[in-house]
Image (cartoon, helix red, strand yellow):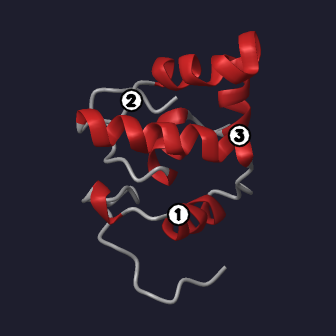
Amino acid sequence: MEMSTPLPTVDAEGYLVEPQDWSEVLAEEFARQENIQLTADHWDAIHFMRKFYDEHQVAPDARFVIKHLMDRLGTTARNRLFELFPYGYVKQACRIAGMKRPRAWSTG
């Protein structure tokens, strides 16, 4: 998918500098760069992350996303999150959802 507008400003690791610059089109571009085809489960996690960010002005810890996914997926939610974003919650989920890179978290 080609983006018709220039990418918003990202840091050296490819995370948005300003999370309010995020859009679903941008999420699709970031996912393409990570070789991820976004599914309904991806979008469920991403939309939860965006809502959490809008309410708290901070990226949700993975445990909050897992708890959200458990409502629909039950006990498989933890494994499912890591299937959706196999190279790590911070590296892939946070980046695709337009979060700033959480500095205090591990990349795994």
Secondary structure at numbered mark 2: loop
Q: Can you give x and y, in whole percent of width and height, for residue 71 in the image?
A: 65, 18
- Left or right of 87? Residue 46 is left
Residue with the most extreme top position: 75
Q: Can you give x and y, in whole percent of width and height, for residue 43 in the image?
A: 62, 47
- Give me the C-alpha separation between circle 1 and circle 2: 18 Å
Query: Where residue 107 is drawn, which disc sits there?
Result: none
Instruction: Give whichever of 88, 49 is nearer the camera.
Output: 49
- Give me the C-alpha separation between circle 3 and circle 1: 14 Å
Q: Can you give x and y, in whole percent of width and height, for residue 89 in the image?
A: 53, 34
Q: Amino acid at mark 1?
A: Glu
Residue with the mark numbered 3: 41
Secondary structure at numbered mark 3: helix
Q: Are marks 1 and 2 in contact (CB under 8 Å)?
A: no
Pointer 3 local density, CA inside 10 Å: few below 14, some 14–19, many at least 20: some
Q: Earlier in the sequence, mark 3 or mark 1?
A: 1
Pointer 1 local density, CA inside 10 Å: few below 14, some 14–19, many at least 20: some
Please name the residue shown 54% across and 62% down the image.
30
Q: Earlier in the sequence, mark 3 or mark 2?
A: 3
Q: Are marks 3 and 1 in contact (CB under 8 Å)?
A: no
Q: Are marks 3 and 2 in contact (CB under 8 Å)?
A: no
Query: Where residue 24 is drawn, which disc sits there?
Result: 1
Give the quadrant of the N terminus: bottom right
Instruction: Give whichever of 88, 48 is nearer the camera.
Output: 48
Q: Amino acid at mark 2?
A: Pro
- Give me the C-alpha separation between circle 3 and circle 2: 17 Å
Please name the residue shown 37% across and 34% down the image.
52
Q: Amino acid at mark 3?
A: Asp
- Left or right of 35? Residue 106 is left
Query: Where residue 60 is drawn, which disc sits there?
Result: 2
